């Protein structure tokens, strides 16, 4: 059983793409890239998050923290970019 609120979700909204990374309690990172929806950026965030959680077989209740990338990039985001390939 997955502990509620134990995953972190990172979201980076850009003009063309929205990148999402879901980090598990053990540090594993799952990523997703979707087209940004400039009329309403929330649509891309919701679509990407829903797909990312579905791919992982998880419910939204596991997400305890939602962040955006810091500037300059920190190890959390750098590692997610390497995991994405």
Image: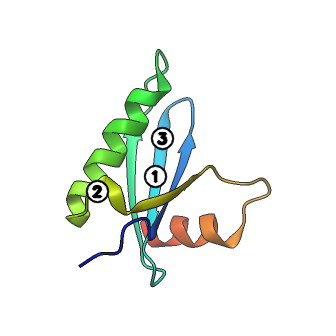
The x and y percentages for residue 15 are: 56, 29
Q: Closest to the observer: 85 or 55?
A: 55
The residue sitting at the top extreme is: 39
The answer to the question of whether label 1 and label 2 lie on touching residues, with beta carbons closer than 8 A, is no
Cα gap from disc 3 to disc 2, whole angstroms: 15 Å
Q: Is residue 85 visible?
A: no
* Residue carrying label 3: 18
Q: Tell me what residue is drawn at x 62 percent, y 69 percent.
A: 76
Q: Earlier in the sequence, mark 3 or mark 2?
A: 3
Q: Circle 3 — which element?
A: strand
Q: Tell me if residue 15 comes above or below residue 3 in the rendering.
A: above
The x and y percentages for residue 45 are: 42, 38
The residue sitting at the bottom extreme is: 26
Quarter where residue 47 is shown = top left
Q: Tell me what residue is drawn at x 34 percent, y 57 percent.
A: 61
* Residue carrying label 2: 53
The answer to the question of whether label 3 and label 1 lie on touching residues, with beta carbons closer than 8 A, is yes
Quadrant containing the N terminus in the rendered view? bottom left
* Residue carrying label 1: 20
């Amino acid at each position: 059983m997955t502990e509620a609120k134990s995953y972190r979700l990172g979201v980076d909204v850009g003009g063309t793409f929205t990148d999402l990374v879901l980090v598990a309690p053990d540090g594993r990172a799952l990523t997703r890239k979707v087209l940004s929806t400039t009329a309403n950026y929330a649509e891309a965030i919701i679509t990407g998050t829903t797909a990312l959680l579905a791919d992982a077989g998880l419910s939204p209740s596991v997400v305890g923290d939602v962040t955006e990338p810091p500037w300059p990039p920190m190890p959390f985001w750098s590692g997610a970019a390497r995991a994405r390939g």
